[in-house]
């Protein structure tokens, strides 16, 4: 913990108040698991953060738009509350039309904010990591603290791992709430209030069996011999239908790669002290490459599980991971871009066509934009498709979309 404290103190000192003031304390490992704010180290760093004065620096992004993305919090929760609603009105409105209506509401209420976040978050993350690299190059003794802070990201959703773009959402016309009130027909997420928990105990609030992913969740439980309830007594099916933020590029892989850049940068600083500015510039370019395309999807846990089972939990295929889902599941994903919402599978089709043109010889045959086939429940890449090249092509331009 001491190494984390020393590193994050220097990081706080390096970054301008124009950025640190809008970041949660978790961005500096001030978290009950690490530098607890109720203890000396965390309290001292929080005081440093709170007392930083404006430097007058003009940032190249809108700091007011910076907001960690994490399911069940902030903007993600606001979007989830729209997704909980039944836009089919109990089946009166066709699913396709209801889905379009729900998408229109999300665009109207949150479209501009999402676009602002998609621009600001990656820029803020790059600025933080640039400063972190400078800290360890100026004092390699602080490298351990940086690596420990990277390691800790898996337990801090409001820290660097949340500074992503909002790539896409799973949207259905039907309610995506995991619980339903049988008397009022209101839908809820997994986190119930005290009053709602009482109604659940009385059998008035029950699991929403009309959830679009209910059948997939039940099938997953049976095929993987999962218990009916988790250790806390929550229904496993509810956990699987619940929302999560899924990183398109697995965060563990990203932090591992960033850590390697930092180690090399620290070594270069010691080896070439007279060329440290050049080494810093090289390291910053490498950092940009590692975090490009570091975005999240908002979807049911079960869809992430299905992707992980077929592609691997740390697979770096980005949007191509969606191809491990069936067509109906793929069709549920929508993206917000510069002009509005569009089906994510349209992006997939476009990317695959680009691959076919750019990597002739690597794609043997493309029929209806399908390069991935399911065989016996496992994913098999179509013959002669080099997915490593596909991923490299994709991630090279993802941040520009």
Image (spheres, rainbow, N blue to C red):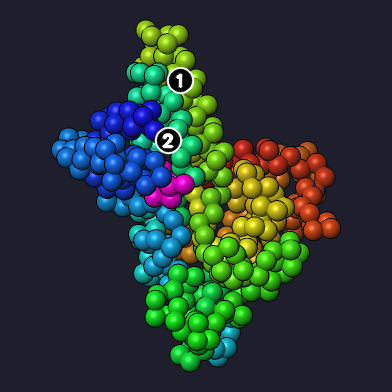
Identify the residue position indicated by label 1 in the image.
265
Tell which of 96 and 89 is nearer to you: 89
Q: Residue at x 54, y 33 (%)?
A: 256
Tell which of 153 and 343 is nearer to you: 153
Q: CA distance from mark 2 to mark 1?
A: 17 Å
Q: Is residue 54 above or below residue 145?
A: below
Identify the residue position indicated by label 2 in the image.
149
Chain-order first, disc 2 or disc 1: 2
| Circle 2 SS class | helix
Q: Residues within 10 Å of mark 1 (few under 14, many from 20)?
A: many
Tell which of 10 and 78 is nearer to you: 10
Q: Magenta residues?
A: 155-161
Label ID, residue 84? none
Q: Residue at x 41, y 65 (%)?
A: 77
Q: Residue at x 60, y 51 (%)?
A: 319
Q: Is residue 62 left or right of residue 252?
A: left
């Amino acid at each position: 913990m001491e190494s984390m404290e020393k590193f994050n103190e220097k990081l706080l000192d390096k970054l301008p108040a124009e950025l640190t003031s809008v970041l949660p304390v978790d961005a500096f490992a001030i978290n009950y698991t690490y530098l607890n704010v109720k203890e000396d180290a965390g309290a001292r760093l929080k005081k440093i953060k709170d007392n930083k004065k404006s430097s007058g620096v003009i940032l190249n992004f809108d700091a007011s738009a910076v907001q960690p993305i994490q399911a069940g919090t902030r903007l993600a929760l606001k979007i989830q509350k729209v997704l909980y609603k039944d836009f089919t009105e109990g089946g009166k409105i066709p699913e396709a039309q209801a889905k379009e209506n729900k998408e229109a509401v999300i665009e109207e209420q949150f479209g501009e904010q999402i676009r602002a976040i998609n621009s600001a978050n990656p820029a803020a993350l790059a600025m933080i990591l640039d400063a972190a690299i400078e800290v360890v190059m100026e004092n390699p003794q602080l490298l351990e603290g940086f690596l420990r802070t990277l390691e800790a990201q898996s337990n801090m959703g409001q820290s660097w791992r949340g500074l992503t773009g909002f790539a896409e959402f799973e949207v259905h016309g039907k309610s995506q709430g995991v619980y339903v009130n049988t008397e009022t027909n209101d839908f809820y997420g997994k986190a119930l209030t005290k009053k709602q928990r009482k109604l659940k105990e009385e059998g008035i609030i029950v699991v929403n069996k009309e959830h679009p992913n209910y059948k997939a969740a039940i099938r997953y439980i049976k095929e993987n011999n999962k218990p009916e309830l988790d250790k806390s007594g929550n229904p496993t099916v509810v956990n699987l239908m619940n929302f999560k933020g899924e990183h398109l590029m697995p965060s563990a892989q990203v932090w591992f790669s960033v850590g390697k850049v930092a180690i090399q940068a620290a070594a270069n600083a010691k080896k070439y002290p007279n060329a440290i500015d050049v080494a810093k510039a090289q390291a910053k370019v490498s950092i940009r490459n590692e975090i490009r395309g570091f975005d999240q999807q908002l979807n049911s846990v079960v869809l992430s599980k299905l992707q992980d089972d077929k592609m691997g939990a740390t697979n770096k295929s980005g949007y191509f991971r969606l191809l491990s889902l069936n067509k109906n599941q793929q069709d549920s994903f929508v993206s917000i871009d510069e002009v509005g919402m569009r089906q994510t599978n349209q992006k997939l089709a476009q990317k695959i066509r680009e691959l076919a043109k750019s990597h002739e010889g690597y794609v043997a045959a493309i029929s209806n934009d399908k390069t991935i086939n399911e065989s016996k429940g496992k994913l098999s890449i179509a013959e002669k498709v080099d997915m490593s090249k596909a991923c490299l092509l994709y991630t090279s331009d993802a941040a520009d979309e």
